[in-house]
Amino acid sequence: MTKDAVGFIGLGAMGRRMVLHLLKAGYEVFVCDPDSDAVAAVAMHGAARCETPRHVADNADIVLVCVPTPDIVEQVVLGNAGIRHGQRAAIVVDHSTTGPSVARRLAQVLAEQGIASLDAPLAGGVAGAQAGTLSVMVGGDLAAYRRCEPVFQAFGRNVVHVGARPGMGQVLKLVNNMIVASTLTTTCEAVLFGIKSGLDAQVLLDMLNASTARSFASEAIVSKTILDRQFDFGFRMDLMRKDLRLFLSEAETVGVPSFAASVSKQFFDRAIAAGHGAEDMTRVAQELEMLAEARIERTA
């Protein structure tokens, strides 16, 4: 069976690694990004350059989008040179985190032009994109999902169709990132209390990670990066704050209280106000450290 030609728009830290996996899996890939160096890097491995999203959609059967914000997604898909004006694309997949409202709006507009739409946000960060082990949470038409599933499996290990209604993948991604952000701030706050009260940071975290308080934040973030003063988990501060904002907005829409998300967002707001928006999200720990006048670090 002939493989679908794949388009990919957005060659950031995640996207360019995903493209390399698609090429390795034997897909013909058409790419577009305003960063010419990023385009050149994947073109060296066989990707074809396109000048606009529409040009991508003129050449690809399935077009994947992986960009930072909902506004950019809408411009890429619906703009004057957007995907919806292409002559070939049958399915548009949004891997960005935009929230369910945007996903449903895109699905409606694209359906009017005979184009299927899937929202398929990702979890696993840059490390997962590098290893090809991303989690892909897919919402939308089941037939479109089945056609795209082999594409997702080129860079994903945990690929799941979470619901036929557009936006369900986005809902799950917002749930995931709200929990990550909230457990990160909560864990740092509690650990700083323990450290300032006299506990050794390593002993404290080892016991947490063997006890009922363990979490992804305590095991994979605080213990493996922050404790060694390495703030490089692979997800930007401003993007996590954006996802918390989306969570709060969508939670209000459906009438769910969101006290923890609101408090967590304030720490990210503080860090961004201090000029750290483009830095790694783990630097939010330093905001708590400044307030506590203590540090999460190994002792000699």
Image: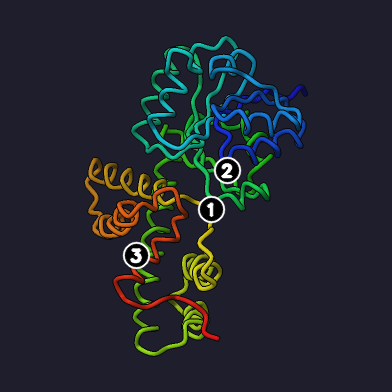
Residue at (33, 33) in percent of width and height: 101
Q: Nearer the viewer, mark 1 or mark 3?
A: 3
Query: Residue 234 has which mark?
Result: 1
Q: Is residue 2 left or right of residue 224?
A: right
Relative depth, front residue between 291 and 73: 291
Q: Secondary structure at mark 3?
A: helix
Kind of residue at disc 3:
Glu
Looking at the image, is 83 positioned above or below residue 154? above
Q: Nearer the viewer, residue 15 or 249?
A: 15
Task: Specify which label sits upstream in the sequence, 1 or 3.
Answer: 1
**Disc nearest the viewer among 2 and 3:** 3
Report the amino acid beneath label 1.
Answer: Gly
Answer yes or no: is residue 143 visible: no
Q: Quadrant of the N terminus?
A: top right
Q: Earlier in the sequence, mark 2 or mark 3?
A: 2
Q: CA distance from mark 2 to mark 1?
A: 9 Å
The reply to whether residue 274 is visible in this rendering is yes
Q: Assess whether mark 3 and mark 1 are in contact (beta carbons under 8 angstroms).
A: no
**Pointers 2 and 1 in contact (CB under 8 A)?**
yes
Task: List the residue tagged with mark 2.
Answer: 13
Which residue has dot 3 on it? 287
In this rendering, the answer to whether 262 lies above or below 293 is above
- Report x, y in % for residue 72: 42, 29
